[in-house]
Every structure is written in C-alpha cells, then in structure tokens.
Amino acid sequence: MITDSDLARPLLPGDGPQEFFLPPLPRLLPADYHPDAARIEISSNGWVRRMLEPCFDSEESLLLFLRQRNGLYGPLTVPYARTARAQNIADWYQFVTVIDSFVSDEAALGADHAAAAETFAAVVADLRDGGDGGGTASLYGDAAQDLWRRIAAGMSARQVERLVASLEAFLRGCAQEIRSKLAGAVPDFEACMGVRVDSFGCAFLELLTEYAAEVDMSRPAAEGVFDEVHHHGMRQLILVNDLLSWRKEYAQQDTMTTVRVLCEVEGLALQEAVDRLCALVEHHERAYIAARDEVLSGPHGQREDVRAYLSGLDHLIGGSQEFEYLTPRYFGDGAVWDGSVSGWISLTAPVARFRDAPGVPPCARPARPLV
C-alpha cells in the first residue's frame, strides 16, 4: 500500500507540476447502472472477504480495498445482464483488481517479477486442471476456481478456452509491468500499449461482455469481424484509465502508463501529455463508434447476437469510464464523487477532486495511506 512518504519523493525528471487540468472527455457512450447494482456490490465485497482475505496483510488493508468500490465495476459495465451473471462478473473484476493492486505493491507481488510469475503460473495451472481443486491451490487459486466453476458453466467450450487464455494474458502483462517497474524502464508508446492490452485485461473484457449478453462471438472474432471495433474500443479504455488513474500510478512510480511514457520518453510536459492523451481518447472513441456502425450496417449486423454484443461493448466502455470517475482507488481514500468530470487534479493531496482553479494548497496529510 502507498504511504505518505511515497507521495513526497520526486518521480518525474525535475519533479514537475503537482497537478494537471483534465478537459472534458467526449462520453458518447452509455453509462448505466444495473438495477441490482447495490446488492451486487455488497455481495461481491463479501466474496472478496471470504475468498481473498488471506491475500491482504491486515484488516485495514482489506477495508481500504473494499472502500474503493471495485465491486461496482461489474454492475456498471454489464447493466443489462441477468443478476447472476452480473454477480459473477463483478466478482471476477474484484479478483483481477486485487491482483493488480498487489502488482504495484513492492511489499507484495510487485517485489519480484519472477516470484510473481510463479504465483501466476500456479493460478493458471489450477484452472487448466479443470477448476476442481485438484491443482496447486495457490494463494489466489481457490478464488480462481470458484469463479471458473460459476462462469465456465455458462460458456461454450471455445469460450472456456478463451477464458483461461485471457487470464493467462492478463497475468503475463502483470508480470511484465513488475519487471519494467523494478528495472525503472519506461517503454515507448506502442510497446507500452502492447503490454497494457494484456495487463488491462482486454481479452477477458471482450469475453465477459459476450457472457453478459449470453452470446458467443468466438467465430466472428476469430474471423476478424471486430478487429477495428476492438482496436479502438480497447485503446479508449486504456487511455481513459491512464488519465484518471495517473495520481495512483504517479505515487506508485509505475512505468507502464502512457502519461509517464509521453513525459519521460517523448519529453512532453505533464499538461501537454494529458492534452495529447485526451485528443487520442476522442479519436479512438469516435473511431470505435464508426467501426461499430460499419459492422452493424454490414451482413453481420443483421444478426441479433452480434448486435447484442456490440451494445454490450458500448456499455463496457461507457461504464468503465463512469467507474473511474467515482472510485476512491484513483482519487484517495475517502473521496466521494460529486459528478464532476473535468477540472484541476492534485497529484499529492490525500483526497483529490476536480477543482475549478489550480494552485489550491494541499491539506494536511492523514496518517492512513492514500491508496
């Protein structure tokens, strides 16, 4: 977990600006809440405690994680799904977010990329053994097996194969992020995006969108029908996340983020980097919509399952952005969203919000960690 001392050390060359202005982003896609969102979030928090509590070093660390409201990500990204499937998806996203949290923590998985890779291999081995408890029962294995049993039951054989492959890709990307951070290596933009496609979980984001809509897009996806849709949609997701999570990534000295890439590799000032990424977000969001509409106007667009899947992707992208505005994971423990989506953001205030003007002196830091 991050402490106040993490916030005090310089991270970028010359210890640059301690705040930036986030312009309004397009938000052209729907952001809806599942009708059972509150109950799903609460139930998912209970699942984290039952299945993943041993992963946390203390009760306070667990509560800190639960206060981030990660259990709401599922209900925001699949608001149309049957409640049982939405619950399974919420728990899956909690599971991978726990892993992502410890990847950035040098007192946990982030301490050693080789050891983390061994842990990740054990998780995948558990699933490849069928998710029946017959594997290595890794630290995360019981939770992975529980998710496997619930989610795989509603998937085709091809989707089940993709589920394991998607988790494997995510864990591979996490291990690469740890390696890069420990080496202090900041990649170029395209190399960063290549890793982020894995570590952001793009493969399972697409797959769980199918699962929520109760369709199987394995064949048209393999045939390249959605290549442009996925390319632009996933880049929009990653870049929005990099912008809204920059406080967290800055404090944790993470290297695999496009904000830092533009600052340290391309030499842009922080505000210039933010402005460029905002322009890219708009480009990819509009290009996604154009690619989606092209599929809908073509022969595949007459299929109800294809139309349901593409509608699901709309909600995935819009809901993901909604979540990233509201989570204290990115704005500090105790943050409460007031609906603002643009303004000045402090990198060092214990709890941040979008402000109308720059230069507000930071408040006294609390004793507890920021994120």
Image: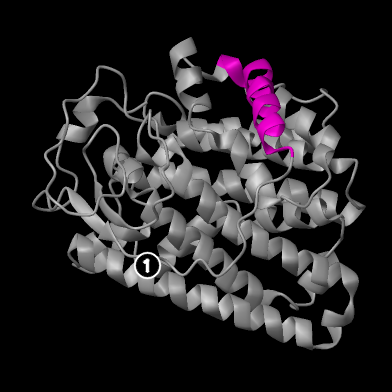
Displayed quadrant of residue 108: top left
Mark 1 neighbour density, 10 Å: few (under 14) some (14–19) many (20 or more) = some
Q: Position of residue 169 (x, y in %)?
A: 62, 51
Locate the C terminus and report the quarter of the image it occupies. Answer: top left
Does residue 192 appear in the picture of this structure?
yes
Q: Main secondary structure of the magenta part?
A: helix
Rendering coords of residue 163 (x, y %): 76, 48
The answer to which of 254 and 128 lies nearer the viewer is 254
> Which residue does the image show at 60% across and 43% down from the upper left?
73
Quarter placement of the N terminus: top left
Residue at the location (22% across, 36% down)? 349
Q: Is residue 148 left or right of residue 359?
A: right
Magenta stretch bounds: 36-54
Observer-nearest of 351 and 242: 351
Which residue is at the far left? 14
Give the residue displayed 14% in from the left and 42% down from the top. 10
User: Residue 359: x percent and y percent?
Assistant: 11, 49
Element type at mark 1 = helix
Q: Is residue 158 above or below residue 365?
A: below
Q: Is residue 209 left or right of 271 when viewed as pictured?
A: right
Q: What is the number of callouts on the image?
A: 1
The reply, left or right, for residue 16 in relation to residue 70 is left
Residue 9 quadrant: top left
Read off the residue under disc 1. 189
Image location (x, y in percent) of residue 360: 14, 44
